Image: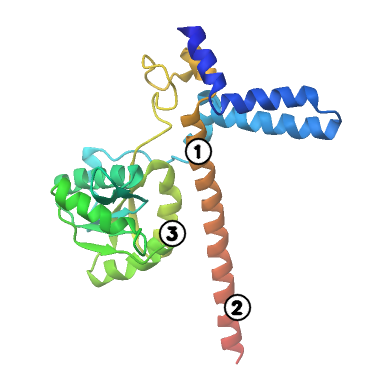
Amino acid sequence: MEAYTIIKQLLLPPGLLLLLLALAFFLVRGTLGRLVLFVAWTLLLAMSVPLFAGLLVQAAEPYPALTEADLRHTDAGAIVVLGAGVYSDAPEYGGTTVDGHSMVRSRYAAWLQRRTGLPIYLTGGSGAGAPAPAMRRFLEQELGVPVAAVEDASRNTWQNATFTAPMLEAAGIHRVLLVTEAWHMPRSVAAFERAGVEVVPAPTYFVSSGRRLGDDPRLHGGDRGGDWRNWLPQAKVWCASFYAIHELLGGFYYDLRARLVSSSQDGRLSIDADQ
């Protein structure tokens, strides 16, 4: 069984890609070509092996899960749920419904709403593929939880915050429980705080915690080094690394964008003052 597991992991992506890159390293002539292949192989390996990728994903998940005690002292006025995506034209459902990301966010929002009684605000998407309307149907029709309002014009996290803030202000809400995946939370918190909304992070679907990046069901408490299978490249680990890198780069971009906007506004104010 152990030999089968090793062979399977090495013949399926990304293991197969690692083998091909290693083979290319010995076939390619020239220092520069080999250096490029070695860097590509190293990065792919680091992003595909739980022991290495776990550190990267952990950096993207700094906010802990809320406890029951936290929920009793949040002073929040609403639950804001960020939309993700949709499962379009789902034949088994007879139409469009939530995808996996939208589903886990909606489920946690429903869990929070039943414990706090706070209204739910959904934000995300525009057009036929907007996730917020699909999430509303999922929450109300399948989970039996009411939705107070839907923002369906935004196309990214920045706009989620920008377009939702006026809705919350009109309702007299200034502090919210913000729901999204743990790895998506840092960028989301920053965007909403820049929009003037006070945020209590309510992350869900932690990837770096416990044994979720490993294959061994006997691993508990985050001991990823306790089993040799966690040294093998795995597709789900590669996906987790993708999301972590996406969020870390996205957070850097949002911070840079905010600084540029602030500098631009300061410049206009200085010109107005001189005039």
- The answer to the question of whether label 2 and label 1 lie on touching residues, with beta carbons closer than 8 A, is no
Considering the image in quadrants, where does the C terminus appear? bottom right
Q: CA distance from mark 2 to mark 1?
A: 35 Å
The structure residue drawn at horizontal position 78% and vertical position 32%, both measured from the top left corner, is 35
Q: Is residue 226 above or below residue 32?
A: above
Mark number, residue 267: 2
Amino acid type shown at disc 3: Asn
Q: Is residue 244 above or below residue 253?
A: above
Q: CA distance from mark 1 to mark 3?
A: 22 Å
Query: Looking at this view, is 102 or 222 the one in front?
Result: 102
Q: Is residue 229 above or below residue 242?
A: above
Amino acid type shown at disc 1: Ala
Q: Which residue is labeled 3 in the image?
A: 156
Coordinates of residue 116 in the picture (x, y in percent)? 16, 48
**Residue 244 appears anywhere in the view:** yes
Q: Quadrant of residue 163?
A: bottom left
The structure residue drawn at horizontal position 35% and vertical position 44%, both measured from the top left corner, is 101
Which label lies toward us, 1 or 3?
3
Question: Helix or strand or loop: what does disc 1 sit on?
Answer: helix
Q: Residues within 10 Å of mark 2 (few under 14, many from 20)?
A: few
Question: Helix or strand or loop: what does disc 2 sit on?
Answer: helix
User: Colour scheme in the image?
Assistant: rainbow
Coordinates of residue 69 in the picture (x, y in percent)? 22, 40
Mark number, residue 59: 1
Amino acid type shown at disc 2: Gly
